[in-house]
Amino acid sequence: MSSDQKQCRQCGTCCRKGGPALHDEDRDLLRDGKISYRDLVTIREGELAYSPGSGALEPARREMVKINGRAGGWTCFFFEEESSSCGIYAHRPLECRLLKCWDTDEVLAVAGRDTITRHDIVNAGELIHDLIAHQHRECPAEVVATATAAWRQHPENEKCRAVLADLVRRDLALRDHAVDELGLPAEVEFFVFGRPLFKQLAGFGVGIREQAGRLEFLWP
């Protein structure tokens, strides 16, 4: 990249690295319907996530709500491939407004600051609020993060595998109950609960399949 670049080339590189985290300044976008729950994904505390500072995957220091990826990938949901443009450019979140690929100082200055969590934008008494509380009881973020880290350090340890397998089952049961029995719209699942634990583990080579109604884990 030349040092004299002063404007966006619309190459899409930034957008393909992942959607932005939302900050306090972005709440109006949610209130005004410019961004909805179905467009979001929650990154729970301790979950590995892309760090704009290091450019690597690092454990999230606190819960974040981000724009979801497209089709199961990381490319921002609002990035339009054919035109290499943003579908909500006039209403883009704070991090997108500050981001300049030739000078990242402004966006790095706000990274991790004044970010919002699910509880900041969901009202008490809503079904989603109750489901988030249920998740905290059934699959606490700190337990998931600790179990994942322990397994990564000792991948052959049967106890570590058993703890993770139990958490995966709890996580899936919670989601199935919310969608099938409580009527939670499936398209807001990633906002309400974050990415399924089994999908996070898939990034480390763990395969899962259902055999005769039971989950079978294919450990690397």
Image: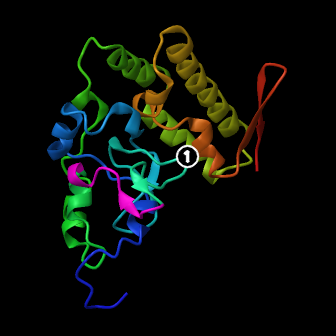
Q: Residue 62: image x %, image y %? A: 32, 44
Q: Residue 135: image x %, image y %? A: 44, 23
Residue at screen point 51% across, 38% down:
195
Q: Is residue 78 magenta?
A: no
Residue at screen point 43% across, 56% down:
80
Residue 7 shown left or right of residue 85 in the figure: left
Which is nearer the eye, 27 or 141?
A: 27
Q: Is residue 86 magenta?
A: yes
Q: Which residue is mark 1?
A: 71
Q: Is residue 102 above or below residue 159?
A: below
* Residue found at the far right of this picture: 212
Q: Is residue 51 above or below residue 215?
A: below
Occupied quadrant, residue 6: bottom left
Q: Is residue 151 above or below residue 2?
A: above
Magenta region: 82-91
Q: Residue 174: image x %, image y %? A: 53, 19
Residue at screen point 43% across, 28% down:
188
Residue 103 shown left or right of residue 65 in the figure: left
Residue 51 shown left or right of residue 206 in the figure: left
Residue 161 visible here:
yes
Occupied quadrant, residue 157: top right
